Image (spheres, helix red, strand yellow):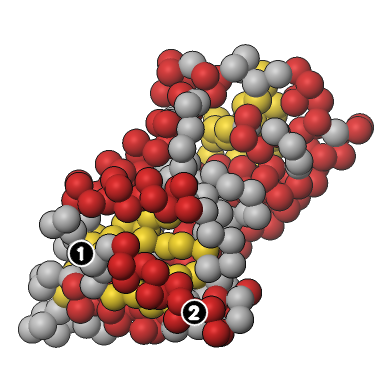
Amino acid sequence: MTDTPHNLSGFKSGFAAIIGAPNVGKSTLLNSLIGEKISITSPKPQTTRNRIAGILHTDDAQIVFLDTPGIHHSKKIFNRKMIDVAFSVLEEVDLAIIVIDAAHPDPASESLIIEKFSAHKKIPAILAINKIDLIKKTRILAIINHWAKAHSFEEIIPVSATEGTQLPELLSAMIKLLPGGPPFYPDDIVTDLPVRFIASEMIREKIFLLTGQEIPFAAAVTIESFKEDLEKNLVRIHATIHVERDSQKGIIIGKQGAMLRAIGESARQDIEEMVESKVFLKLFVRVDKNWTKDLRSLKKLGY
């Protein structure tokens, strides 16, 4: 429990799940609401694999967000496991924010979300129609009317996570639905995730952004060592990038190691900003054959 003084009369706190199809902007929305980079983002779907907790503090409320993997139809073991993770969150939250992409609808995934969510009617839900900056304003009302008929949402709010449009309205709607109670975390905590986990996610984000084709989806990152040298204001990190095939290892390393250096340099800059000190980042690449299809390997790599 936080030691930070609050006027607890009327204070609200609770957990909120952010749910949606792949690539609708859930992680961007989380980062925009928190004001910190907690969850990794990329133009590619299925970036988020683990539930990411971000904590938002206001004068009269605290919301603990759980970001989730994109929900979609899939027969692959790995993807089905990610979808199970997403829906398991509904058992432990006070409300849900369902996010859809106004510019690029995904009817199959959206129908699956509504179907699954209907089994949790006790949880109030807000629909966030994201990316309204990419469509004509005249289309927004028709989208709202469509979704108002699909499910009895508490609120339907058009937003733009990248532009910040109507995020205060979304936040206000969420706070209204929170139960009363004291904050769960101190005011200076923005996530309950270990720093080394966020560092591994930052490395994985750079793989998503810098490589193409199947590489990002076949890559996992583990932190082998994370040591702080307080005297030198330096953090030393050794991390391993796991891929499924030798050909993928070659692509990650790149010609004369160029790609691996680019991934490491870009990730190092983000990690330095997070830990507020210099970072020495050493990356290794290892082949774990077909790890995304093997339940034992998935567990070993933290999925």
Q: Mark 2 or mark 1, which has the lower sequence index?
A: 1
Residue on which disc 2 sits: 140
SS at badge 1: loop
2 vs 1, front mark: 2
Q: Which picture quadrant has residue 176? A: bottom left
Do residues under tags 2 and 1 come within 8 Å of each other at their CB atoms?
A: no
- Residue 65 lies, in percent from the top left, at 33, 60
Whether residue 2 sits left or right of residue 44 in the image: it is left
Outermost residue toward the left in this view: 9
* Residue at 49 percent of width and 79 percent of height: 140
Classed neighbour count for the residue bearing mark 2: other residues with Cα under 10 Å, few (<14), some (14–19), many (≥20): some
Tell me the quarter of the image containing the C terminus. top left
SS at badge 2: helix
- Residue 268 lies, in percent from the top left, at 68, 51
Residue on which disc 1 sits: 124
Q: Which picture quadrant has residue 12? A: bottom left
The amino acid sitting under disc 1 is Pro
Front residue of this view, candidates 10 and 6: 10
Whether residue 248 sits left or right of residue 31 in the image: it is right
